[in-house]
Amino acid sequence: MDKMTNTTVAKILEMHSVLYFIEAGRVFADSMFGGTEIFEEVIDVSDWSRKQLLHWLGY
C-alpha cells in the first residue's frame, strides 16, 4: 500500500469538497455519513492509499 502525504490527502479532499482538519500530524475527514452536524463523525484517512481514498469518495 502506498501511503500518501498529508498534503496530497488534503488536496484530494479539497477537490471533492470534503471537510477535513489536521491534528497531531493526522488528517481527519468528515465521514459524510454520520449525520447533519459538521464533524459529527470523522475518519482518520492519514495512512490511506490513493486507491482507498478514491474508493471512499465513491470512485
Image (cartoon, rainbow, N blue to C red):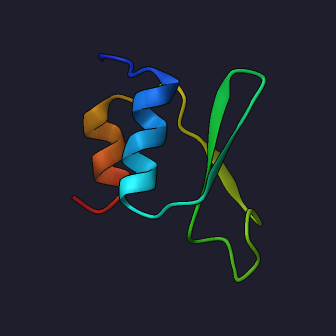
- Residue under the image location 77 percent in, 66 percent down: 40
User: Would residue 1 appear left or right of 24 to someone viewing this image?
Assistant: left
Q: Quadrant of the C terminus?
A: bottom left
- Place residue 15 in its image quadrant: bottom left
- Residue under the image location 46 percent in, 64 percent down: 17
Instruction: Please say if 38 is above or below 39.
Output: below
Q: Quadrant of the N terminus?
A: top left
Residue 31 in percent (x, y) is at 59, 60
Instruction: Please say if 52 is above or below 4.
Output: below
- Residue under the image location 44 percent in, 35 percent down: 9
User: Would residue 43 appear left or right of 37 to someone viewing this image?
Assistant: left
Residue 29 in percent (x, y) is at 59, 50
Instruction: Determine the residue located farthest toward the left in the rendered image.
Output: 59
- Residue under the image location 29 percent in, 51 percent down: 55
Residue 38 in percent (x, y) is at 73, 70
Instruction: Please say if 36 is above or below 56.
Output: below
Instruction: Please say if 22 is above or below 37.
Output: above
